[in-house]
Amino acid sequence: MFQRAFLPLALAATVLAGTTLPADALDRRVRIVNETGVTMVRFFGSNTGSGSWEEDILGEDVLPSGSAVVVNFDDASGYCKFDFKAVFEDGDELVRQGVNVCETGTFTYN
């Protein structure tokens, strides 16, 4: 359902800086950045109309601190508002509700 691409942080910044789309294109790609000092082991992003967290977007992968992943949240629902849940290797879970993925190009966990 979701597309993801892992990029080194510097490369991701360079690629995204050179890519612009018109505001009405509703680009739902968001660069998720982990700057927590702890590896992210699971990441969920479900539209606010969903009653569950759906699938772990990272799958078998992890997102080390200092790294980023680009996630395409276009799930064909038409939603722009998504809830994010990040789970870290130390057991911490961070939930952020109502992130507008049509307006947010980068979301950073600190």
Image (tube, rainbow, N blue to C red):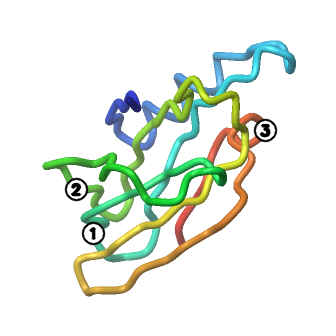
Tell me how far mark 3 sits from mark 1, CA to CA. 26 Å
Residue at coordinates 72% horizontally, 59% vertically from top-left?
A: 98
Sort mark 2 into few (<14), some (14-19) or many (20+) by Cα contacts within 10 Å: some
**Quarter assignment of residue 25:** top right
Residue at the extreme left? 60
Identify the amino acid type marked 1: Thr
Q: Which residue is mark 2?
A: 62
State left or right for residue 7 relative to residue 85.
left
Per the rendering, the mark at residue 103 is 3
Q: Is residue 82 above or below residue 108?
A: above
Q: Earlier in the sequence, mark 2 or mark 3?
A: 2
Per the rendering, the mark at residue 39 is 1
User: Contact, CB < 8 Å: mark 2 with mark 1?
Assistant: yes
Q: Nearer the viewer, residue 50 or 67?
A: 50
Sort mark 3 into few (<14), some (14-19) or many (20+) by Cα contacts within 10 Å: some
Tell me how far mark 2 sits from mark 3, CA to CA. 25 Å
Q: Residue 5, percent across and down?
A: 35, 30
